[in-house]
Image (cartoon, rainbow, N blue to C red):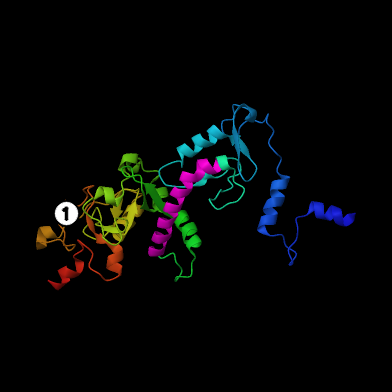
């Protein structure tokens, strides 16, 4: 009798005496108070659950199906892509495409969002590896995605609706207090749409390198989803309280040509200037439009 009580109160134990993650999750769901049909929907708050068709999340929380659909249509808050909106509105428990126990109605609502998240996470892992998050190649793809989503910003292009890399999150946070850097959604345009003529045959437009907006150096930072900075101008940006640095004059005005080897509008102009594919340059092949080495030879 005592053994039976202990079994009812505790999750099944593994051979090592510790409950597995699945067993702990099952025990937690068993402790969850089942929603009553007379409870209000946790999203709209205005109507009881029994008034509308409902869907239940794997964690056990239940909501109106149309309220969940509206929440998913609204997607992430703000401009930077995040996926918290796909989780449970009450407890924030994540829902994955490979997760068992997802109701068919909820699975149908989430399917296009699963596909978009997979596309974004593939880009996040690739960019995180390029940014040096790979820990000497020892980091798993899942770890790269986790670190990348915490440190990098990705946006949805206003023209083609594809996700693209938009810089580091700490820059976005620093710019939040600057009214001059408020983002217009129409300004969020990927490299492929902002520079149709520049596209690497091997890697597409995702890794096209750009000129710094304020001087004649290759940009190493892309902030606010729209502005390219070299390391020096980016440092000046942060030191000045997120105010853009003064544009420098191009050396071409004194020496006849720009060290980048490309014609470009005056520094400070919002127009983006592409220099070629960064991945091709790293692999020591000559990227289209990037003339730094050819300048030194001439």
Which x, y percent locates residue 62? 62, 37
99 vs 2, nearest the viewer: 99
211 vs 66, nearest the viewer: 66
Is 296 situated left or right of 73 in this image?
left
Q: Secondary structure at mark 1?
A: loop
Tell me the residue at 59%/47% (across/down): 93
Using the image, determine if residue 163 lies above or below residue 18: above
Q: Quadrant of the C terminus?
A: bottom left
Using a 10 Å C-alpha cutoff, classify the residue at mark 1 as few (fewer than 14 neighbours), some (14 to 19) or many (20 or more): some
Query: Looking at the image, which residue sits at the far right?
Result: 1
Using the image, determine if residue 14 lies above or below residue 197: below
Reading the image, the residue beneath label 1 is 264
Snapshot quadrant of residue 221 = bottom left
Which x, y percent locates residue 256? 9, 61
Is 163 covered by the magenta stretch? no
Label tally: 1
Is 18 situated left or right of 291 in this image?
right
119 vs 133, nearest the viewer: 119
Q: Quadrant of the N terminus?
A: bottom right
Work out whether residue 184 can be spotted.
Answer: no
Which range of residues does the magenta coloring cover?
106-131
- Is the magenta region chiefly helix, strand or loop? helix
Which x, y percent locates residue 177? 40, 43
Query: Looking at the image, which residue sits at the far bottom?
Result: 297
216 vs 116, nearest the viewer: 116
Work out whether residue 21 can be spotted.
Answer: yes
Which x, y percent locates residue 196? 23, 50
Is 144 situated left or right of 255 in this image?
right
Tell me the residue at 81%/55% (across/down): 7
Is 126 covered by the magenta stretch? yes
Using the image, determine if residue 249 lies above or below residue 87: below
């Amino acid at each position: 009798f005592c053994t039976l009580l202990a079994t009812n109160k505790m999750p099944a134990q593994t051979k090592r005496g510790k409950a597995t993650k699945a067993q702990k999750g099952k025990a937690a769901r068993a402790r969850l108070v089942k929603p009553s049909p007379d409870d209000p929907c946790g999203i709209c708050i205005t109507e009881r659950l029994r008034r509308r068709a409902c869907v239940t999340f794997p964690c056990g929380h239940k909501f109106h199906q149309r309220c969940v659909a509206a929440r998913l249509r609204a997607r992430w808050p703000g401009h930077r892509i995040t996926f918290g909106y796909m989780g449970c509105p009450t407890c924030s428990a994540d829902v994955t495409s490979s997760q068992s126990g997802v109701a068919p109605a909820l699975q149908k609502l989430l399917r296009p969002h699963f596909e978009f998240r997979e596309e974004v996470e593939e880009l996040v892992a690739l960019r995180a590896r390029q940014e040096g998050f790979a820990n000497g190649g020892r980091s798993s793809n899942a770890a790269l995605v986790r670190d990348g989503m915490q440190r990098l910003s990705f946006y949805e292009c206003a023209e083609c609706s594809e996700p693209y890399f938009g810089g580091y999150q700490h820059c976005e946070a620093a710019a939040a207090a600057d009214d001059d850097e408020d983002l217009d959604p129409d300004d969020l345009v990927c490299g492929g749409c902002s520079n149709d003529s520049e596209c690497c045959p091997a890697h597409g437009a995702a890794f096209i390198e750009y000129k710094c907006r304020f001087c004649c150096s290759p940009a190493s930072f892309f902030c606010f989803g729209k502005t390219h900075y070299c390391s020096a101008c980016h440092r000046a940006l942060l030191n000045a309280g997120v105010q853009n640095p003064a544009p420098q004059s191009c050396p071409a005005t004194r020496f006849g040509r720009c060290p980048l080897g490309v014609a470009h509008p005056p520094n400070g102009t919002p127009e983006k200037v592409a220099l070629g594919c960064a991945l091709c340059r790293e692999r020591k092949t000559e990227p289209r439009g990037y003339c730094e080495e050819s300048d030194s030879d001439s």
